[in-house]
Amino acid sequence: MDNLVVGALAGAAGVAAGFALKHLFAAARAKAAADRLTAEAESIRQKARADADHIKKDAQLAAKDELLKLRSENEKRLEADRHEARDKERALQKKEQLLDERESAHEKRQRMLSDVEATVAKRQEAVRVKDDEVTKLLDEQRSALSRVAGMTVDEAKTALLDKIRVDVAEEESRLIAKSEEKVRATVDERSKDILSTAIQRVASDHATEITVSVIDLPNDEVKGRIIGREGRNIRAFEKASGVDVVVDDTPGVIVVSAFDGVRRETARRAMLKLIKDGRIHPSRIEEIVKQTQGEMEEDLNEAGKQAVMETNVGQMHPKLVHLLGRLKYRTSYGQNVLQHSIEAGELAAAIASELGLKPRLAKRCGLLHDIGKAIDHEVEGGHPAIGADIARRCGEDPIVVNAIAAHHEDVRMETSYAVLTAAADAISAARPGARRDTLERYVQRLQKLEEIACRYEGVDHAYAIQAGREIRVMVNPTKVGDRTAQRMAREIARSIENELTYPGEVKVTLVRETRVTDYAR
């Protein structure tokens, strides 16, 4: 029992000692941890102080650098301002010096001008005195001449000028007539041979000038379908094709009217397709017209290529080829312009070969001379200027460009090829049967020819003959002399050129005839 009590006491003592030791160890660990935390806090405080000192030093250094930089920039700016001020000061000094020099030169010129003015005044006075003396002497001589001649000075001047004017006019007419006779003697026969050869070598057909196309209809029912309900089909066709469609009481036909030949032909073909197809309504009309326009463009290009191949003028810009094709559906005074252009090219080539020039270049000039007529209804200006501008932009030779621009003498002819082109154009247009003219215009031209000739003093009668290609002028021989007759014929020809438009040329023949009558009794 005692042993158990002792054991229990010993165990309790052991437990108490264990608790005591544990408490001591825990206290020791807590103290060690507190010491460690205190050391770490002190280390952080020291590091923070060091970082703060470092940041402060960096800020101080940056501020010093910025201050130095600003001070350097200010010094540079001040130095630049000083240089600019010195430059301006030097410039002002130069200007002041230049002004002083100019002022000195101005004063010198003023002194010189004063000297010159004084000299001129003296000379003017001397001239005035001499002029008075000469005037007085001339008056005395005029008075003496007037007494001798029995007329005043003005009367003598008028008489002398009239005499000189008459003599000069007569001499001018005589010299011109002599020169013309000499030129005709040498070139008339040669030019006739060349032109006749050229005309004989070239021949082409010509078409009547029209602005309408007549389309035959299978029956009158088709006419009603073309018109459509309340006219919507015909309005759609006119809008799509750009032509006028005339539907009247004439049975079995309708008329397509337009001044543009290409547009008119396109509309005619489209209308025939619609009649054949049978489906006539606005959407179908637009489709057929658009399709026909594409086909027409291909036909125009093909016609242009055919003309280029036929004339053998070499390569040509596609735009010019297309415009040549458009000329197939263009007429002028009844002539088909494409055929006329081909004919003019052949004529120009024939004449060029006779004159020793380049036939191929002359043919190219003749073929393209009317190219402006393909779009003259779309572009402002005359067809020579339009055609020359197109040819220039398409890279044609300047010789060709000038020939196109000058073939109606709107601009100066710079080369022989321009003259040849104008001549070939006139020959093609003026040869018999080449052009059709209306009766009214024909009569008006004849009347105007006779009216122009009868304006001149001394003309008794004037007659337009040979379809207006010649005007015969009968003059009074007592009022018009031989030399005056030559001058009058030339003036009548110039008046016709300036006032009339006509194909080819008009011959002016002035007849002065003296008849003497006597009687035997």
Image: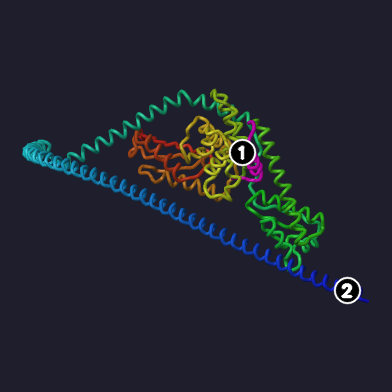
Residue 305, given in percent of the width and then of the height, sits at 68, 37
Three-letter code, disc 1: His
- Magenta segment range? 313-333
Q: Is residue 287 above or below residue 126?
A: below
Quarter of image, res 274: bottom right
User: To which residue does mark 1 refer?
Assistant: 340
Q: Would residue 120 be found to the left or right of residue 214 on screen? A: left
Q: Decide which of tag 1 and tag 2 comes sooner along the chain.
A: 2
Q: Residues within 10 Å of mark 2 (few under 14, many from 20)?
A: few
Q: Is residue 387 visible?
A: yes
Quadrant in which the C terminus appears: top left
What residue is shown at x 68% (from left), y 59% (from top)?
239
Residue 39, given in percent of the width and then of the height, sits at 62, 61
The residue at the far right in this view is: 1
Residue 53, given in percent of the width and then of the height, sits at 50, 57
Q: Would residue 497 be found to the left or right of residue 205 on screen? A: left
Three-letter code, disc 2: Val
Q: How many marks?
A: 2
Q: Is residue 74 magenta?
A: no
Disc on res. 6: 2
